[in-house]
């Protein structure tokens, strides 16, 4: 199908983009890579009055380092992520999850910021951002504000972005020496969404687990942390027994949906299994 | 209407398009480049894959206005030369020789995705080929001969094509042979 008509704006700077959003009328949509939005518009599930295309806003694309953090521009494509040297060194969890996103063609257009702002609970990157305690930099008419990942994701397909605001960059801590990571995704066929997935980053120190960050994909209307498992892992010896025991708590506090792919109890089972696998792989077991 | 300037398969075009016009519809309906096909409504099938500034994209999931100032290569632009004297692209030739198609509807997208894959990974394993073309669906072949075709093309493009006994299209289903013969 063909989308409903819309007015089209193609800014080249963040300032111009904010102006275009402000001038765009009642129903403005921001077009990042378009790999979720354009299909939705084709099905006429969305029919915005104005589309503000960020593809040519060069300042939003790319990865840079600032002290202990990596700063990822919202319009950095998934394909960019997979070839970026800084992410290769300090952002392997993001790289691993991005490798599983959709397919080659979609990864050429789809963007890191677009996937986060879309906030699909089955999307792979929100749980990673949450596990990393990423910070989201939002630009609006009144200036910029920074929101932690735990506050950015509000509900199903809903973020804290206000009307007139734009996600411009995402700041994540560099994971260096001592950290191991793994993104474990469970789906049935190529290019499918996660039924459940687990993002784990674990830091080892002297044979023990010093710190664990675990994000859950598709275990509720927003990405979630497996907090009970994280707490249970801190200070334990690295062994399959301790990891298995901690992973058994991975589904605590989750509220996954029932759908054609899986019932809620099956998703909770998967969360435990995938957490065990992800943590074990992250610590090198 | 918005004016766009694009280069498609080596020729320059200036056209007015509605912003909502998808790139694939512009290519097919305004330029007559019907080699690029539409296979689905959900961005899953990959049949409409073209190269936008050298990168494989699904042309049903890009607006024509977004191609303004860009180079587009479709399946119609990968062979060299014209008409009788045209030389197929090695990937096109390999799909022909390895019988990497049955109905042929997915083939333009398969070839465009495969060319993109081989640019990044000139010598993919079977598994890497399968992952590389995961964005393209074929409902006929079971992918066996498509994978063979891509590997054959890879060998040819890197100049290492040898007398590899693997480099054959899959044998016909012998269980069906007698039925076919009986009908003849």
Image: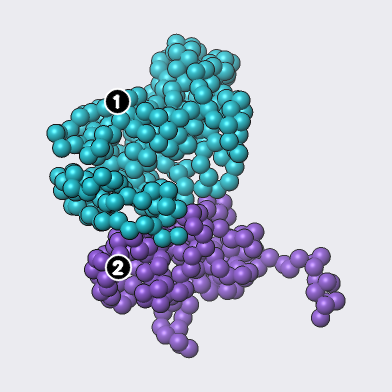
| Chain displayed in cyan | A
Question: Is A15 left, or right, of A220 in this rendering?
Answer: left
Specify the quadrant of the image occupied by residue B107. bottom right
- Check the picture and name the quadrant holding the C terminus of chain B: bottom right
Q: Report the quarter where the N terminus of chain B lies.
A: bottom left
Nearest to viewer (mark 1 / mark 2)? 2
Residue A96: image quadrant is top left
- As drawn, which residue projects farthest toward the bottom? B84
* Disc 1 to disc 2, C-alpha distance: 41 Å
Return the x and y of residue B132 as percentages of the image width and height: 50, 54
Q: Can residue B119 be spotted in the picture?
A: no
Say which element carries label 2. Answer: strand
Which residue corresponds to the image point at 18% horizontal and 44% vertical from the top-left?
A22
On screen, residue B40 above or below B75? above
Per the rendering, the mark at residue B17 is 2
Q: Which chain is purple?
A: B
Q: Is residue A114 left or right of residue A197?
A: left
- Residue at figure coordinates x 42%, y 52% from the top left: A44
Nearer to the camera, A197 or A161: A161
Res. B71 mark: none
Above or below, comparing residue A206 to residue B133 in the picture: above
Q: Are tags 1 and 2 found on a single chain?
A: no
Q: Residues within 10 Å of mark 1 (few under 14, many from 20)?
A: some
| Residue B36 on image: x %, y % | 46, 69
Q: Quadrant of residue B149?
A: bottom right
Residue occupied by mark 1: A148
């Amino acid at each position: 199908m063909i989308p409903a008509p819309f007015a089209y704006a193609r800014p080249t700077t963040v300032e111009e983009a904010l102006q275009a959003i402000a001038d765009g009328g009642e129903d403005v949509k921001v077009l990042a890579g378009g790999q979720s939005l354009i299909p939705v518009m084709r099905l006429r599930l969305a029919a915005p009055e104005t589309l503000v295309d960020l593809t040519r806003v060069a300042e939003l694309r790319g990865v840079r380092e600032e002290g202990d953090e990596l700063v990822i521009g919202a319009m950095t494509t998934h394909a960019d992520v997979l070839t970026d040297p800084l992410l290769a060194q300090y952002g392997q969890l993001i790289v691993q999850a991005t490798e599983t996103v959709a397919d080659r063609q979609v990864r050429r257009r789809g963007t890191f910021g677009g996937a986060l702002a879309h906030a699909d609970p089955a999307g792979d990157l929100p749980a990673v951002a949450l596990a990393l305690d990423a910070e989201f930099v939002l630009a609006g008419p009144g200036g910029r504000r920074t929101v932690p990942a735990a506050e950015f994701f509000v509900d199903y397909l809903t973020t804290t972005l206000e009307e007139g605001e734009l996600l411009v960059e995402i700041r994540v801590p560099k994971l260096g020496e001592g950290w191991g990571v793994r993104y474990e995704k469970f789906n049935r066929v190529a290019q499918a969404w996660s039924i459940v997935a687990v993002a784990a980053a674990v830091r080892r120190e002297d044979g023990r687990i010093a710190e664990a960050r675990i994000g859950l994909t598709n275990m509720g209307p927003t990405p979630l942390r497996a907090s009970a498992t994280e707490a249970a892992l801190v200070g334990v010896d690295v062994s399959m027994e301790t990891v298995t025991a901690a992973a058994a708590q991975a589904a605590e506090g989750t509220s996954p949906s029932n759908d054609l792919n899986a019932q809620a109890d099956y998703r909770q089972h998967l969360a435990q299994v995938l957490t065990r696998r992800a943590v074990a792989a992250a610590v090198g077991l | 209407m918005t004016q766009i300037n694009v280069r498609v398969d080596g020729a320059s075009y200036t056209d007015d398009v509605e912003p909502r016009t998808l790139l694939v519809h512009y290519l097919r309906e305004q330029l007559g480049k019907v080699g690029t096909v539409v296979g689905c409504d959900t961005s899953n099938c990959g049949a409409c894959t073209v190269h936008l500034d050298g990168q494989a994209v699904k042309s049903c999931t890009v607006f024509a206005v977004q191609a303004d100032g860009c180079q587009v290569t479709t399946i119609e632009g990968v062979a060299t030369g014209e008409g009788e004297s045209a030389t197929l692209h090695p990937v096109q030739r390999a799909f022909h020789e390895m019988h990497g198609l049955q109905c042929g509807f997915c083939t333009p997208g398969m070839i465009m995705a495969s060319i993109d894959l081989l640019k990044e990974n000139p010598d993919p394993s079977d598994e890497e080929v399968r992952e590389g073309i995961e964005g393209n669906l074929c409902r006929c072949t079971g992918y066996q001969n498509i994978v063979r075709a891509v590997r054959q093309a890879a060998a040819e493009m890197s100049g290492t094509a040898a007398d590899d006994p693997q480099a054959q299209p899959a044998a016909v289903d012998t269980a069906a042979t007698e039925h076919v013969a009986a009908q003849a």
